[in-house]
Amino acid sequence: MSLKKKAVLFYGVIFILVLVLILGYANSGIKIKVGNQKITEKIINYEIGVTKAYSDNPENTASNFKIPATVELMRLMLEKEVALKNNLTVTPQEISDFSEYVDKNTKAPKILDKIKEIFTKDQESYRNTFLAPKINILKLQDFYTKKSGSINGFDEWFQKEAQNIPIQIFDKELKGKICTQYQAVWWLKTACK
């Protein structure tokens, strides 16, 4: 086989691999990726439900909450990536203990009931989407406080830790709305290029 044919074959294989990867993302249901954290439409819908549960206006529809809920979910995933970067993980036992604590000590039982109703058939998502992020931020703040001796400066430290975590928004419509409505959010700047 001639060198020219080998080159054509090689580039053809590379092209097909790239195409498969692109189509794989397009068909995988992944809307956003924050570091290694994948956000699907299903998880976005759960976060919309959680956000809506905090609203006492029955006229607010899911579409009113989609962009703010998605940005909140992205922030939570960014916190998770920073936690993982610092070897901080949330264990199943911590989630279980926190769940019991929340059940016993909530100041808003009606809101908690609404949130639990959203996740009735998917307890794993309740633990990972609703409970674990609350533990994550507490662990990050505790880690920083022990490291620095004070909570002062946490936001600056977090920004430094998070600045190189890649954020990719694969859904063009979602990306357009997020990047238009949240231009000032520092961690979205790379995703919105």
Image (cartoon, rainbow, N blue to C red):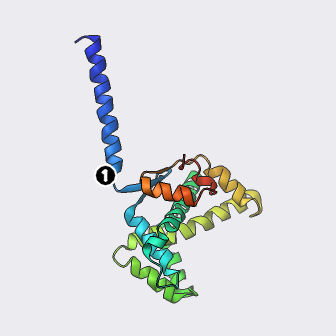
Helix, strand or loop under label 1: helix
Q: Amino acid at mark 1?
A: Asn
In this view, 21 is above or below 10? below
Q: How many marks?
A: 1
In the displayed structure image, the side of residue 39 where residue 145 appears, left or right: right
Residue at 41% across, 56% down: 31
In the displayed structure image, the side of residue 149 where residue 19 appears, left or right: left
Instruction: Report the quarter where the N terminus lies.
Output: top left
* Image quadrant where residue 147 sits: bottom right
Residue at 55% across, 87% down: 108
Neighbour tally class for label 1: few under 14, some 14-19, many 20 plus, Cα within 10 Å: few
Residue identifier under label 1: 27
In this view, 5 is above or below 15? above
Residue at 48% across, 72% down: 64
- Residue 34, x across and y down, in percent: 50, 53
In this view, 15 is above or below 181? above
Residue at the outermost top position: 2
| Residue 58 seen | yes
Instruction: Report the quarter where the C terminus lies.
Output: top right
- Residue 192, x across and y down, in percent: 54, 50
| Residue nearest the viewer, comparing 148 with 166 | 166
* Image quadrant where residue 19 sits: top left
| Residue 88 seen | no
In this view, 93 is above or below 183? below
- Residue 96, x across and y down, in percent: 48, 75
Residue at 53% across, 80% down: 54
In the displayed structure image, the side of residue 32 where residue 7 appears, left or right: left
- Residue 55, x across and y down, in percent: 52, 81
